[in-house]
Amino acid sequence: MSYSDRMQRNHLYSVLLSPRGAPRMVDQGKQIAQQFLSPFDSLIGLIGDSGSGKSILLKGMFPGIELTNDDEGVNVRPLPIMNLDDTGFFSPHTYHLDIRFELAFHQAHELADAIRLALERGKRVIVEHFDLIYDQLGMNAHLLIGIGEEIIITRPSVFGPEPNDIRDVVFASIDNRRMAHTAEDLVEHSLIDRRVYHFEHYDVRSGFILSFHDRPNIDLRDLESDVKQLIERDLAISYLDANHVLIGDQRHYCTGPRMHVTSTGKIRNFQLYHEYLTHPVTKDSQILGLVNIPSNYRLSDLNSLRLMTFSEPETNS
């Protein structure tokens, strides 16, 4: 019995907040690999919408991995996993494929057959959009990761979870993450107008946190008002390059340029907490921004735990 099996046999699932921006997502991937990945995991599945950060997370989990999809254009190189018999003596140990991308070039049953053959030969296969191949493949992943507003990490068993369960959760929450990221960039944009340039980023459900070593002399109600005016103008948000987006016609630095709504007007119910928060350890001052939640929220509700049970409520007879 392997050490990895003894350590992870009781792992049901873990939930992490999805970071925004490539550097933080890479760091998160490294953490996931250290804490949850076993050397004996042969089939690793990722589920999430385009732009959610799947490929970047993989670069953190597997430094140096050669991805076969291409977000910048059309990748014309043949898919290595489809040519297992032709790779010769120096064949790869790990194969990657993006099912949504490859379905433009191969039938689903061909991709499923190639994955099964690679597994039979002792290879590791990493599959993005795993939910699109699950029915044809007929087997679940050893490690299954969903990326939406949160990152869900699970080791499926005969009891689940099924890939479609993960898909339903992460696809339902991804809009909140897009709205929060766009609102975060609008707040940054307004802070730069106020000559505030230095802060760190933290995450919270349905929102974001900007943290300052030195508290800026800014009225948060005025800052909120300026951002709401940008939202009301319904400015287009568009990808410019790997490190920038356009807000209207203004170039803005962003390391997660694909994780935005298409225009500022799609941000629902933006609000800033009107007082600075204080980090309990570093004592830094923090600004909290939220989207798409009721105005009567409590801070303690944002990252609350919710009980899941199958038992029926008791009734008095």
Image: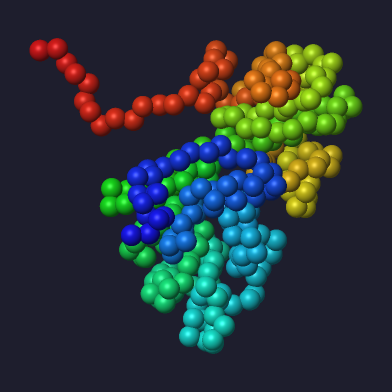
Q: Position of residue 72 (x, y in %)?
A: 70, 61
Which residue lies at the image location 52% right of the left edge and 26% below the top edge?
303
- Does residue 30 appear in this view? yes
Residue 242's place in the image compared with 226, above or below, is below
Q: Nearer the viewer, residue 172 or 288?
A: 288
Quadrant assignment for the N terminus: bottom left
Residue 85 at what x, y percent from top left?
48, 85
Which part of the image, by quadrant, shows the C terminus? top left
Residue 74 lies, with reference to residue 162, above or below; the image says: below
Can you tell which quarter of the image residue 224 is in?
top right
For residue 135, side relative to residue 264 (left or right): left
**Can you give x and y, in whole percent of width and height, for residue 63 in the image?**
63, 60
Is 189 situated above or below 32? above
Q: Quadrant of residue 66?
A: bottom right
Identify the coloring: rainbow
Is residue 233 visible in this depiction of the protein? no
Question: For the point 65% across and 29% down, which residue is it?
Answer: 208
Task: Name the residue at 51% across, 20% down.
Answer: 301
Q: Is residue 132 left or right of residue 259?
A: left
* Residue 273, position as x, y percentages in the image: 66, 17
Q: Is residue 160 left or right of residue 276?
A: left
